[in-house]
Amino acid sequence: MKMRIDVISAVPDSLVSPLNTSIIKRAQERKKVEIYVHNLRDYAHDKHKQIDDKPFGGGSGMLLKPEPFFECIDKLLTERKYDHVIFPSPGGKFYDQKIANKFSLAKNILIIAGHYKGIDDRVRQKYATDEISIGRYILTGGEIAAIVIIDSVVRLLPGVLNDSESALNDSLMDGDVIEAPYFTRPAQYSGISIPEVLLSGNEKKIKEWKEEQSKILTDKWKKINKLE
Ligand code: ADE
């Protein structure tokens, strides 16, 4: 089953390069996902194609107007149903692997990216099913959050990663687990040697070492992030 992702943005150019590079590009070429970027300005009909306006009640900065969003979303909704209408926002639920796994099971996803001060709140009220924050910081817009969500979801789709194992073994895939570090040649570089066990050829020992390292790194990660 091919997933479809639609993104609405006032700055669609910012999405082009990340969506057409590396694994996300390959996923589209392999027909595992179709990604469509919609330019909000195409849905502005006044003379100046204006998509922003001053906020009621004052305050600095401009807001994205509701009408172009409503028109674009209503058009998309006449064409298909969306399992998730995602609204990236600092006020949303913190994004994590569990949510990425859930989104990866969807057939159709729509992401509404805001820019400038934000979007007239009626867009969120009317359409958003999932309000998502990618962290406790403020971005200039939802586009980068949209890329984070798309990247983390698309890599989970069957047939996207070459080694079908690697997504399953990943850090955080089966809960909150950080993997052991990896090394490649040369075995000694810049005065730093790789752990000797990795050169031993002893698979059992290597497996034990990886598990031990993973536990150490996971404990450290929980501590520095004040988890549990
Ligand atoms: N838009 C601005 N900041 C954001 C954040 N931290 N997460 C998601 N969307 C955002």
Image: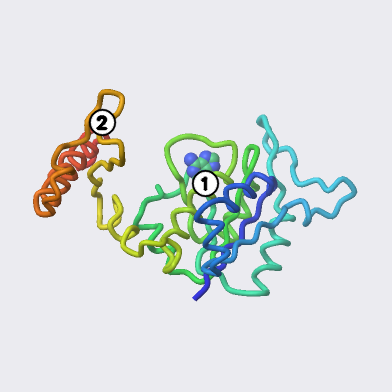
Q: Residues within 10 Å of mark 1 (few under 14, many from 20)?
A: many
User: Label 2 amino acid?
Assistant: Gln
Using the image as rendered, state which of residue 166 and residue 125 is in the foreground.
Answer: 166
Q: Residues within 10 Å of mark 2 (few under 14, many from 20)?
A: few
Q: Residue at point 71% right, 68% down?
A: 75
Q: Residue at point 53% right, 60% down?
A: 26
**219 above or below 177?**
above
Label 2 residue SS: strand
User: Label 1 amino acid?
Assistant: Ala
Task: Tell me if 86 is positioned left or right of 135 in this view.
Answer: right
**194 above or below 163?**
above
Find residue 207 and report its horizontal and vertical position in percent: 14, 52
Give the Cα separation between the discs numbered 1 and 2. Answer: 38 Å
Using the image as rendered, state which of residue 75 and residue 167 is in the foreground.
Answer: 167
CB atoms of marks 1 and 2 within 8 Å:
no
Residue occupied by mark 1: 145
Using the image as rendered, state which of residue 102 and residue 16 is in the foreground.
Answer: 16
Q: Is the shortest distance between ligand 1 and the CB of mark 1 under 8 Å?
A: yes
Q: Dividing the picture into quarters, in which one does residue 67 lie?
A: bottom right
Ranked by sequence position, the earlier of labels 1 and 2 is 1
Q: Dividing the picture into quarters, in which one does residue 34 lie?
A: bottom right
Q: Which of the numbered marks, if any, corresponds to residue 188?
A: 2
Find residue 62 and report its horizontal and vertical position in percent: 70, 37
